[in-house]
Amino acid sequence: MPLIAANWKMHKTIVESEAFCAALLPLIEDSDCEVVICPSFLAVPSVAELCAGTAVAVATQNMHFESQGAFTGEVSAPMLLDAGASAVILGHSERRQMFGETDEALARKVPAALEAGLTPILCCGETEEERDGDQTDRVLRRQIDAGLSRVADDRLADVVVAYEPIWAIGTGRTATPEQADDACGFIRALLGSRSESASARVRILYGGSVKPQNAAELLGQDEIDGALVGGASLDAEDFAAIVEAA
Ligand code: PGA
C-alpha cells in the first residue's frame, strides 16, 4: 500500500489545518493509500482528532532524542504520542542545512522514536553539487548508515526512508523517475546488506517537487513506495490528486 505524506513545514495555523482536513477527508475516502499529515506541532491534536478513525495518520517534523529534560524549546517522542502523532520526520534537509541537524543526533533520534512507538521517516538526499560530483551514493550511504546505526536489524523495516534530493525540494525540478528509482534502489540495497527481509519490507518514499502531474510516474517505479510532498500538500485538492495517483 503506497504511503503518501504531507510535509506542511511552517505553514497553516490550527484553524487552517482543520479546514484542510475537512476538505481532504471526503476527497480521499475511497483511496487505499496510507496517508500521513505532518502539520506544525501546535496543530497535531486537532488534526489527530479530526482524522481519528480514518486512514490518515499524523506525524511531526522533528523531535528531540531524550524523552524529557532541560532542553528548552524541544519536544520529545512521548509528548508527540500523547498529542496524537504516530510518526515523525527526522533529518529533513531543511533541518540539516538551516538548524544544524547532525548525523550523530539522528543516530539517537531514530531509535528513540522507534522505542517510543513512533514511526521514524528518515530523510536523506544529496545536494546538486554532490550529484554533479558523482557523490550521491557516498552521501546516501553516510546518511543512512548514521541514521540507522543504532537500530537493531529486526527493527529496520519499521523505519520509513525518504529519498529527497535537495536540488529537487521546492524548486519545481523533480528528479527523473529513473534517478529517483535508482537512488531508492541504492538505499534498499544498503538496508539489504544488513537484513534481506528488511530491505524487502522497508518503505522508501521519494520527495522533491512531487505534484499531481508527475506523481503517477514517480510512484509507478519499482523501488518507490510512496511520496513525501511539500508544496503540493498545502492544497487539499492537489494533495488528494497525488493520493489518487498512487
Ligand atoms: P516539495 O518539498 O514537495 O515542496 O519539493 C518536499 C519536502 O521538502 O519534503
Image (cartoon, rainbow, N blue to C red):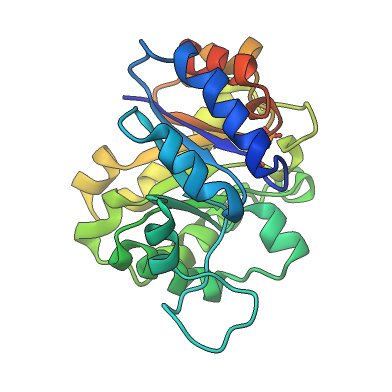
Which residue is nearer to you in this view: 10 or 215?
Answer: 10
The reply to whether residue 194 is visible in this rendering is: no
Relative placement, left or right, of 196 versus 54 is left
The residue furthest bottom is 70
Which residue is drawn at the image coordinates 42% and 51% (left, top)? 85
The reply to whether residue 42 is visible in this rendering is: yes
76 w.r.t. 128: above or below? below
Quarter of the image where one finds residue 206: top right
68 w.r.t. 95: above or below? below
102 w.r.t. 131: above or below? below
Which residue is nearer to you in this view: 153 or 25?
Answer: 25
Quarter of the image where one finds residue 131: top right
Which residue is drawn at the image coordinates 23% and 61% (left, top)? 153
Which residue is drawn at the image coordinates 58% and 21% (left, top)? 239
Which residue is nearer to you in this view: 65 or 220?
Answer: 65
Relative placement, left or right, of 8 versus 243 is right
Give the percent coordinates (x, y) of residue 152.
25, 66
- Total marks shown come to 0
194 w.r.t. 150: above or below? above
Could you tell me which quadrant the N terminus lies in?
top left
